[in-house]
Amino acid sequence: MRLRRSHLICCAASKEKMAAHLSYGRVNLNILREAARKELREFLDKCAGSKAIVWDEYLTGPFGLIAQYSLLKEHEVEKMFTLKNGRLPPADVKNIIFFVRPRLELMDIIADNITSEDRHHSSRDFHILFVPRRSMLCEQRLKEQGVLASFINIDEYILDLIPYDGDLLSMEYESAFRECYLENDQTSLYHTAKGLMTLQALYGTIPQIYGKGECARLVANMMLRMKREFAGSQNQILPVFDTLLLLDRNVDLLTPLATQLTYEGLIDEIYGISNGYVKLPPEKFAQKKQGEGSKDLPTEPKKLQLNSAEELYAEIRDKNFNAVGAALSKKAKIISAAFEERHNAKTVGEIKQFVSQLPHMQAARSSLANHTSIAELIKDITTSEAFFDNLTVEQEFMTGVDTDKVNTYIEDCIAQKDPLIKILRLVCMQSVCNNGLKHKVMDYYKREILQTYGYEHMLTLNNLEKAGLLKPQTGSRNNYPTIRKTLKLWMEDANEQNPNDISYVYSGYSPLSIRLTQILARPGWRSIEEVLKMLPGPHFEERQQLPSGLHKKRQQGENRTTLVFFLGGVTYAEIAALRFLSQVEDSGMEYVIATTKLINGTTWIKSLMDRPESPTQ
Amino acid sequence: MAFITASWNPLGDAFYRKTDLYEMSWSLRDGLRDSLVAAAPYGGPIALLREPQRRSPSSRPQLEIYSASGGTIASFPWKSGPVVQLGWTVSDELLCIQEDGTVLIYDLFGSFKRHFSMGQEVVQSQVMEAKVFHSPYGTGIAIVTSSSRFTLATNIDDLKLRRLPEVPGLQGKPSCWVVLTQDRQTKVLLSNGPELFILDNTSCTVVCPPGLSPQDGNIVHMSVSFSYKYLALLTDSGHLWTAFLLHPFNLEFTCLPRCRRPKSQQPSVVLMWDRLLLVVGVCNETIQYPIEDPCVLVGEMDGVRIISSSNQELLQEVPLVCQDIFKIASMAPGALLLEAHREYEKSSQKADEYLREIKEQSMLGEAVRQCVEAAGHEYDTNTQKSLMRAASFGKCFLTDFSPDQFVTTCRELRVLNAVRDSSVGLPLTHTQFKQLTLQVLIDRLVYRQFYPLAIEVCRYLKIPDYQGVSRVLKHWASCKVQQKDLTDDAIARAVCMKVGDSPGVSYSDIAAKAYECGRAELAIKLLDFEARSGEQVPLLLKMKRSQLALSKAVESGDTDLGECFTGRSQPLQTGFCKLQEQETLKDLYNQDDDHQELANYYVTASYREKRLEGRLSLLQSAVDEYNKAKNEFAVKTTEDEMRLLRFQRKLDDEKGAGLLGLSLQVTMETLLSLGLHKQAEQLYKDFRVPDKRYWWLKLKSLAEKEEWDELEKFSKSKKSPIGYLAFVEVCIKCNNKYEAKKYVSKVTPEQKVKAHLAVGDLEGAADAAIERRNEAEIGAVLSRCSASNSLVIERLNRARAAIAKK
């Protein structure tokens, strides 16, 4: 009984802090969240009276990061439905609001909803809120369907960059990489540029822009153009960011393919983190219900929110998994020592003080229990032979061992019909580490894959080729070893427990993207001109003029802040590496990370597949 | 300086003064006699129509427009019908109300803008009188016709005519009338002889103001104040009656309160006769000013401008603060400070005495404030200067005094002095300027085409570019493109040079203006400067330059702009078609001869096709396209796929195996599990399946079916390409240790330890490990040992020690 109550307290406490973690970082990202919330409230208030929201399901995740149901409720949202064909469920409300992405197929569903509405006794008002932008095309489609006139409000909710954590912004734009590199569609870049403009409106003009890659160039161009067009009232905010670095994902195709070895990275690799939540198998969390008899094990997956609001998680998320065990046991000792304190509490005052700390301690204890369980779950996997074999091959590739031959392990995995995505990750990795595969090798892999998993995957293979993940070797020399050596991508003696280099996040491999970031800060890209030329796309530098008076007078020892924008996605391990760099004492640079979407090798490859299969198959 | 009060005239407690504004720069031959004159408030322009009633077609009356200082802006002969009334709108447009009820609107420069009518019935009955009035909604017009009916339009920009009800007993036009507007309502107050009526949308009510009896005679004039707060009536018996309109429409007249200074300024009425101007206050005193010339009075919010043919004056009550300072023998702090400063300039020690006096009352702050405020109200720059200097002097003796008021007033005065200059001719008082706001002042400057001055003002007052300089430049450019005497190139160059990269100036707007004036080439030249590609597109499309528009749309990156197009562009189109129709996409690939993508399209389509024949024919199309794309691998693979499909169908038909759509591997698997070894073998050969994979497949399949003899036979059929550890492991997986052991001996030495461990043979594993002298392997075995295997452990440890020694 006592336990349960404390659980409740910890829930209440965590809800209160819901967004507090956003303001902990160097840059207070809560401002952005508040701006987004304000706009949402304003739209809701535009539709007077009770409301029901019909959700494009995809949007519920990202919206959860901006506003909880309580906010909607305050503005008279009484019901929520998921957008689907047919008649809308009954709801005694004045307004029906559709929250949708601007997609034509969704317009058809909305039209269907509206035409099946009972016209006689329905006096409900309809509204559409397009996220993130309204589109002429969609309105045209609604017009063709003859329902455009039914809408009282058609508005857009510009939700480009969503604050995800204290130092992390994501657009949650899943298809960005695919659109840019496969479909030649720059919509996501346009939204990126718009998002960066919004950011600058709130946090000041970013005086320096660096970039590498085609898309980075395009985004920078759009930004500069937009700056000229909005310019108008000169932004009078003291700039928070000193530098913006735009990086194309295709500059570093290797990193996401490798298995992440940080705690958070592994949680994402194994269970998948979506919009800040992870669903875990419930068995390990069962002991919670001690007091009530352990007969009924929970069957629902355990859903946990993961962000830096949780003290323990903030501490261990970016550690190499091999260092997590030690951190957890250290924490356990501290907590039990804290609980032991009660025996020392003699006077009423001491007891009172102890009790006042109780909620915090209990929250810490339940957090510890959760993470111990998660760590156990992960350990079961990381200690398996399959995981070890896979990692060995990855590391062989990354160090350039036998990348030009057909790899037996891959062959065996295909024969064993291991999940296709795993195979694709490995094959792509080999290709990237060998600057393309020999014709014979590539055709062999392709035939093996097609014969085993079905010919329909030809389209997927085509896509991977188009994206450059899989490519036939051309005449030129394999330049990967040069890149590896110059950028020190492989560190033989990576220290997992007390890291001294970013290579700890992959137990040896230092993510290329982060090396580029690190070198940009010191000593500068001029030192690696040669390598930059080998990587795809142009590299560039732009300056944005600041109004006089806004030039920062830097205090001695004050850190500079760089916003690193990953176009096409970023992995948790890369984020961990950047956080590591922020913490290195003499680096003088702090990083805030922005991206189109948080990815890992699996979700990334999946987004490029044409007939994605479930990974369990 | 000492004579400032010379022009003051006392009226009750208050003083009135006349300030010279301008010597009018016009030269009017006949003065203002016989002319219709309309002058706009806030120092607005003056319109003049000579002899409007002269009807001889040979000499048309001349319509002239002047600035407030008399500078000619426009002049042209009036060619339309007889004009009853002229008036100005709030946005400085000239309204000419004709006898037939037509209202013509001209801009400040005399170019015709549009016209509208005050109703059909007016055409017959003719307009007798008309009035232009201003309300919060804009500019309105009221007319009365010869049939004694009133028609109202409260806002000419959103024209809604309202015909007011009939007034009982009224013949012809009323003796006098005014339009009242307050609280969203507009009504007409009129008199017919001694009677007073109020006329609204639905009714006509008689009103009897208290204190005005019918004996006082017929009402011959009435006037309402600028703010619609005060009303004055004049009867033919010479009685002047004024009232404070609390609620104008119920006409609850309250007697004018005896306002005492300094609470509020008192209302007064200005009456003008041919040769006399009379200011009448509530206190029943009057001031008389003789006049020589016919004049026009223009009511302002804080005074009356008197325009005669030769000069212009402002008649106003002296603002309280000026009275305080300049009144003879005033002891107000401001007055003392001014005096102190004057003495200081004379290097007299009296300055100190005055200052001390102010400071003793701790009124220095107040004194500075008074001087600054008074400076704002003064028209003469020397007076302004001496007041500001005094204020600045006083400020030196103050700490913690906010300089804001001082600085703003300085700046505003400079701007006001600049626009008051007779070359500009905007005689605004400080109070009017505050009411008008800076934004509007800049707009007015722009409208009058004083671009350089407007820009200077913006820069001087540090208005953000977006609302300031940029806006002025935009107007300038829009005006510039209409200059017909310049070439496209010259204009584009001039515009670009001036506007440059000024933020917030939309070149596309300027271009649109140029296009409107029929200068398409100029428009395109200007569009090139537009930063927002997105903005260029719609205009370019309107101009039918789709090719150019297309490239701009691509540049903008906004896919949504693709909406505008129906052909050609690749990147934009694919993104766009992806949203729309698959079919369109196909046509597009076809057009572009993109065989690879076209083939992929067919492959995708084949998966949507349910019938096998359809599927095969689509795949055949894909093969053809892949061939054209010279993608040999894809050709081969697709052909394989078709072969497999045919094979599967055949077997499905023969054996009901349910294979269609399975992958090759799964097909073989299924065949083996069905015992159709021969067919599986055939596929293995036909599709050149690598031995390794086939061996794995067969191994697993046999083990799963527990056909151990078959398995053994198979293992001996030739040397296993996958080694024999696989056999061991698969057997163990199927829980058959006995079978597994059979294969341990065949395993290569490197895998021996693993194999032994897999079957649980620790001894064997230890032997193998020791034999190979491999420390890692010894460790692996050790980790599997439990306490009961002490013998083995001992051997292993010994071996390890031996290795270590070396």
Image: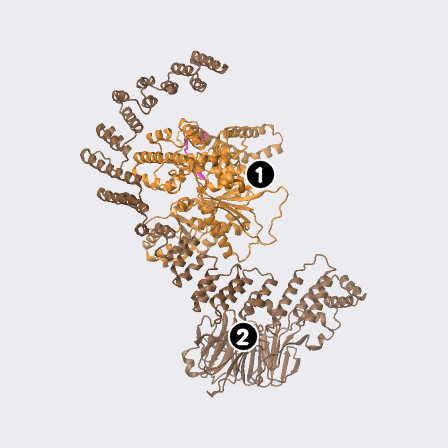
Type of residue at label 2?
Answer: Leu
Q: Position of residue A323 (x, y in %)?
A: 51, 30
As helix, strand or loop, the secondary structure at mark 2 comes to loop
Chain coloured brown: which letter? B
Q: Residue at x 24, y 37 (%)?
A: B643
Question: Dot 2, how many residues are within 10 Å of its Cα: few (below 14), some (14-19), or many (20+)?
Answer: some
Mark yes or no: residue A189 visible: yes
Q: Position of residue B782 (x, y in %)?
A: 44, 17
Answer whether residue A281 is magenta in the image. yes
In this rendering, would B369 be left or right of A135? right
Question: Dot 1, how many residues are within 10 Å of its Cα: few (below 14), some (14-19), or many (20+)?
Answer: some
Give the position of the N terminus of chain B as an image quadrant.
bottom right
Q: Is residue B168 above or below residue B588?
A: below
Q: Chain of mark 1?
A: A
Q: Which mark is residue B737?
A: none
In this rendering, would B615 be left or right of A519? left
Of badges 1 and 2, the one in the foreground is 1
First to last magenta residue range: A276-290
Chain coloured orange: which letter? A
What is the residue that sits farthest to the right in this orientation?
B349
Residue denoted by label 1: A587
Residue denoted by label 2: B251
Q: Chain of mark 2?
A: B
